[in-house]
Image (tube, rainbow, N blue to C red):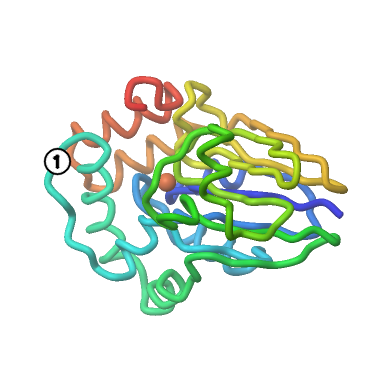
Amino acid sequence: MKILVLADIHANSFALGAIRESFDACLFLGDLVEYGVDPIPCINWIKTYATAAVRGNHDHSVAQRVPPSAGGGLRQLAGATRRLHWNLLRPAHFKYLSQLPVTQNLILDGFRFYLVHATPRDPMDEYLAADADAWRGRLENVEADFICAGHTHIPFHLDLGDCQVLNPGSVGQPRDGDPRASYAIIENGQVQLKRIEYDIDATVRQLQQSGLEPELIELAASTLQSGGRHHS
Ligand SMILES: [Fe+2]
């Protein structure tokens, strides 16, 4: 069985569209929206093809109409794209984002999966890197063979012995210095972290046509073009 694992698409439909893997199941780990300006195809794709999906902090902010917070940089970009999304999305989209569960357990191919956007301690907001001891501490009460999480936009795979922790990285806004779309495949229990080039210029043109302020377009473009190196 071939399982496609995706996270942090962030309204980047060109990055999502570049992933042309066949799959028997698809797991989505949250953050369909914000930072990019083309959320509808991303929501529709996950709604159609994901076997299971969880809610990210950005999905939550859009769906629950959380007022954009003060602060510059990527936070300001998130707030500005959230306002654009509020005009663009229809009730069915808000309903889909708001009903996404915060965690999910499921069995696929004989393996127990636990899905969460960030960590079991703080399911939508905690940033936890590829630190085996820290992850062991978070997993005392989680029973699963594969723990799949996103949120950091940096891919990793940790084998903790009795379980494996997988972060597929970000489809639509990588932050590990590699601008290619990031995702993972689990095939017959074997994890592969993968990258694929996509048309970043097309995503930047969408940003330019969105009505965002020029300095936010510049920030979004440089983050995508550098793979987040300047902002991680
Ligand atoms: Fe994210």
Q: Is residue 37 above or below residue 128?
A: below
Q: Residue at x 30, y 44 (%)?
A: 209
Q: Position of residue 49 (x, y in %)?
A: 66, 64
Quadrant where the N terminus sits is bottom right
User: Farthest residue in the left direction?
Assistant: 70
Q: Residue at x 42, y 30 (%)?
A: 224
Is ligand 1 within 8 Å of the beta carbon of the residue shown at mark 1? no
Instruction: Name the residue type under label 1.
Output: Gly
Quadrant where the C terminus sits is top left
Q: Residues within 10 Å of mark 1 (few under 14, many from 20)?
A: few
Q: Residue at x 68, y 33 (%)?
A: 194
- Give the labeled residue for mark 1: 71
Q: Position of residue 106 (x, y in %)?
A: 70, 67
Q: Is residue 140 above or below residue 185?
A: below
Q: Position of residue 213 (x, y in %)?
A: 17, 40
Label 1 SS: loop
- Camera-side residue: 120 or 60? 120
- The number of callouts visible is 1
Q: Residue at x 51, y 59 (%)?
A: 41
Quadrant housing residue 19: top right
Q: Position of residue 6 (x, y in %)?
A: 60, 49
Quadrant housing residue 231: top left
